[in-house]
Image: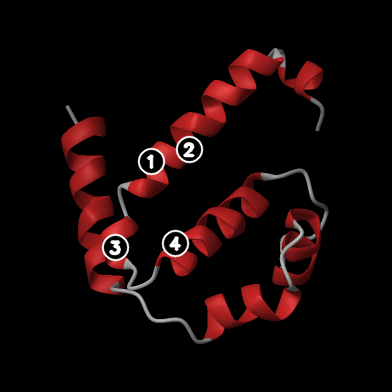
Amino acid sequence: MLHGELGMDVAELEQLEDRLNAYLARFGDCFRRSDTRAHLTTYVRGQLSDLDAKSVEPIALQAGTPVRTLQEFIAQHRWDEDGLRRRLIHIVRDEHVN
């Protein structure tokens, strides 16, 4: 999808990207390694993209990341799932529930 189709200009898209990066950074301490945190950003951006297929291979190829690297992120890398879940619950409760 082109930014014109979204009714957004380049500056607005850049601001949106900054906001996404800031949001994902809030989960950074749930990951043991900085490269794992970077893969989270790649994966989420792929899920939010206009790709026809949202599986690992097309996301990795679009991002210029080796496919195996992103596959390993999904299948093998360890993160604090409970911590992620708790953080998300707190964010939703504190910021989105009246």
Q: Is residue 64 left or right of residue 22?
A: right
Q: Nearer the viewer's eye, disc 3 or disc 4?
A: 4
Q: Nearer the viewer's eye, disc 3 or disc 2?
A: 2
CA–CA distance in space, label 3 to label 4: 12 Å
Q: Earlier in the sequence, mark 4 or mark 2?
A: 2
Compare residues 47 and 33 and report the one nearer the observer. Answer: 33
Q: Earlier in the sequence, mark 3 or mark 1?
A: 1
Name the disc covering residue 84, or none.
3
Q: Tag 3: residue type?
A: Leu
Label 2 belongs to which residue? Answer: 20
> Tag 2's secondary structure?
helix
CA–CA distance in space, label 4 to label 2: 13 Å
CA–CA distance in space, label 1 to label 4: 12 Å
Question: Circles 4 and 2: CB distance less than 8 Å?
Answer: no
Quarter of the image for the N terminus: give it: top right
Question: Circles 1 and 2: CB distance less than 8 Å?
Answer: yes
Mark 1 Cα shell of 10 Å, populated few (<14), some (14-19), many (≥20)? few
Label 4 belongs to which residue? Answer: 37
Name the disc covering residue 23, or none.
1
Which residue ends up furthest to the bottom in the rendered image? 76
Mark 3 Cα shell of 10 Å, populated few (<14), some (14-19), many (≥20)? some
> Tag 4's secondary structure?
helix
| Residue in the image at 23% along x and 54% along y | 87
Eyeballing the image, is 72 above or below 2? below
Mark 2 Cα shell of 10 Å, populated few (<14), some (14-19), many (≥20)? some
Compare residues 56 and 62 and report the one nearer the observer. Answer: 62
Q: Position of residue 79 (x, y in %)?
A: 35, 75
Q: How many marks?
A: 4
Q: Position of residue 51 (x, y in %)?
A: 79, 50
